[in-house]
Amino acid sequence: MTAQPLPPPDDTDQPVSLGGDTPQPGPVLPFAALDTLWLQITGTICNIACRHCFITCGPKNDSHPMMDEEHVLETLREAYDRGVREYYFTGGEPFMHPKILPIIEATLAQGPLTILTNGILITDTLAARLAEIAQASEYSLDVRVSIDGTTPEENDPIRGKNTFHRILAGAQALHRGGINPVFTVTTVHARLAESEGRAEFLALLRELGFTRPRLKMIPPFKLGREVRRGGGYDAAEYLVEGDLMDGEEHVLQCGSCRMVTAKGVYPCPILIEEEGARMGDTLADALKPIRLDQRACYTCHVEGFTCST
Amino acid sequence: MTAPPSSTDASPETIAVFGGVYNNYLSLQAVIDDARAQGAQRIYCLGDIGGFGPHPDRSVPILQREGVLTMQGNYDHSIGNELEDCACGYTDPRDNHFAQISYDYTLGHTSDAHKAWLRDLPTEFRLEFGGHRLLMAHGSPRRVNEFLWASTTPRPFIRRLLDEHEADLLLVTHTGIHWSRFLEEEPTRGVVNVGAIGRPANDGRTEVWYALLTAPERPGLPIDVTFRPIAYDHARLAADMRAEALPEEFVETILTGWWTTCLEILPIKERSRSRY
């Protein structure tokens, strides 16, 4: 690994505004440490165009382009030197990246990895290769598969025609290969957020052969394409100084994570399309406290939400 | 709060370190007996005296009588301060359901004197051992309920923890599964998770595990770390648990060595080795 000295983090403790439009200053979230590094591996390029996508990903959206392999490897080297604990890949659809397998192997050589996918591109061959890579590493590989309902009637209007069956086929390929995925469900259908909805989902997954079903519920963020589907944030939905609870920097992932895309460094995966949330070109620019003045920060706070698995 | 160990030997050559008693007073005595037989000059407990097992008031007197240098875990902090839950850090509803059963039972069966003792325990130990700086914490030196699992605690992160906390070897518990990892470029530095002695290590064996550390013959050489499996009268513990009407799921773990609860917190690699 590189022996080059790392650029020091910004030595001022001045919190960085995320450029939101809240009418009062947001609360300041201290930056504890860079434990979690997100990579927007395929930018905003995706094989589907979900109606609730908070960063409006799709086949034609290259607002954030794919990260090239060298940029990813260089970021991994810096992360190694900074002692990062865990990695997350998202997009877009990470499995559209032409070098995804060597990138996964390189990452798992230095820490645990979670990949967020819609599952559609996962075949039995790919699943077997992923399982082989996972087995060879001393660290965990998790795959999170997004699905938005227990039926095509619930899921397909959100994620696209015929996606329900294609997503499940990819997830089942993973399971056959030896990787038990985490299903992530955006609670656009309110009943799925309730305990009965959760139980129904678990029952469906067991019926499909997932003997240890894993489920993570995600609240919708009222950004990007979701604004047209479900509406944007209400005027009163923002945070002000004094809103954060003691220790919330350990709950909110942005207290210990940063997101790297082909265009720069951002506080978290949610805000990469928000003007003003870009913190700089390098990780060193971004290891500092932030002022939670984006509307979406309200969702994480009130839902107690973390992007981690 | 850091307190210097109440020394019985100025420079020990062998120490025993365990965590997660979980009310298992039978394995506790068995581990202490084994540690003494192995020549341990000091015995350290990294916390979580309560939870899971029967008769909470039986473990504290053993720790006190045997002079075990005991640290406060999240469980001890919660019981000592009569909080509402164990603050174990679980995120799954089923994990939390069973954790609450244990917690309510332990809180209801711990005497005021023992609560006061648990409340005032130190939260960290530091020790020079064979020329190395040892740091002992419950979960991690950063947070009492941080989980350091083998498959999610990579070497670069270990190096950062050691540097930030000025240590060569970090000893922790909290996860219930023992493991160790050392830095490739500095093989004397690393992390030892000593596991738990209150329940098996989810490995299909009924023994429990602790760590025995032996100082190197000269500075610069690594500390020898041996994990020792300890058999005890687990059938008697299971009978006690049934008599106390503790969940049959807990009893099954004691009798089979496989966890039946607290499974969702396991990283995927550790979970894939589980029966459940």
Image (spheres, rainbow, N blue to C red):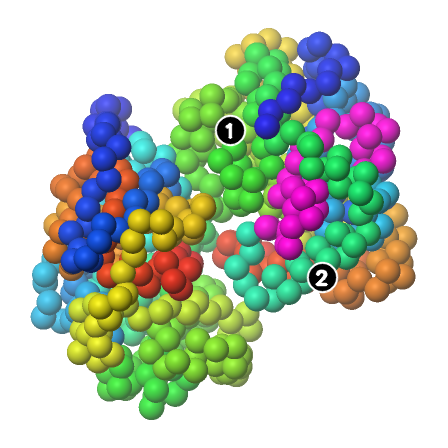
Decide: few, some or many residues near mark 2? Use Cα within 10 Å; few <14, some 14-19, many ≥20. Answer: some
Looking at the picture, how far across and down is residue A158, in whole percent?
27, 81
Whichever of callouts 1 and 2 sits on the residue coming sooner in the sequence is: 2
Looking at the picture, how far across and down is residue A243, in whole percent?
36, 53
**Residue visible at 31% across and 32% down in the picture:** A81
**Residue visible at 35% across and 60% down in the picture:** A300
Residue B73 inside the magenta-drawn segment: yes
State which quarter of the image contains the N terminus of chain B. Answer: top right
State which quarter of the image contains the C terminus of chain B. Answer: bottom right
Looking at the picture, how far across and down is residue A163, in whole percent?
29, 82
- Secondary element type, mark 1: strand
Q: In this figure, which residue is indicated by the disc labeled 1? A: B190
| In the depicted structure, whether residue A193 falls above or below residue A20 | below
Closer to the camera: disc 1 or disc 2?
Answer: 2
> Disc 2 marks which amino acid?
Ile
| In the depicted structure, whether residue A265 falls above or below residue A176 | above
**Residue visible at 43% across and 67% down in the picture:** A216
Mark number, residue B240: none
> Disc 1 marks which amino acid?
Gly
**Residue visible at 24% across and 71% down in the picture:** A234
Q: In this figure, which residue is indicated by the disc labeled 2? A: B101
- Secondary element type, mark 2: helix
| In the depicted structure, whether residue B225 falls above or below residue A99 | above
- Chain letter, disc 1 residue: B
Looking at the picture, how far across and down is residue B48, in whole percent?
69, 42
Decide: few, some or many residues near mark 1? Use Cα within 10 Å; few <14, some 14-19, many ≥20. Answer: many
Closer to us: A153 or A78: A153
Closer to us: B265 or A209: B265
The magenta span reads: B60-88
Q: Is residue B3 left or right of residue A274?
A: right
**Quarter location, residue B122:** top right
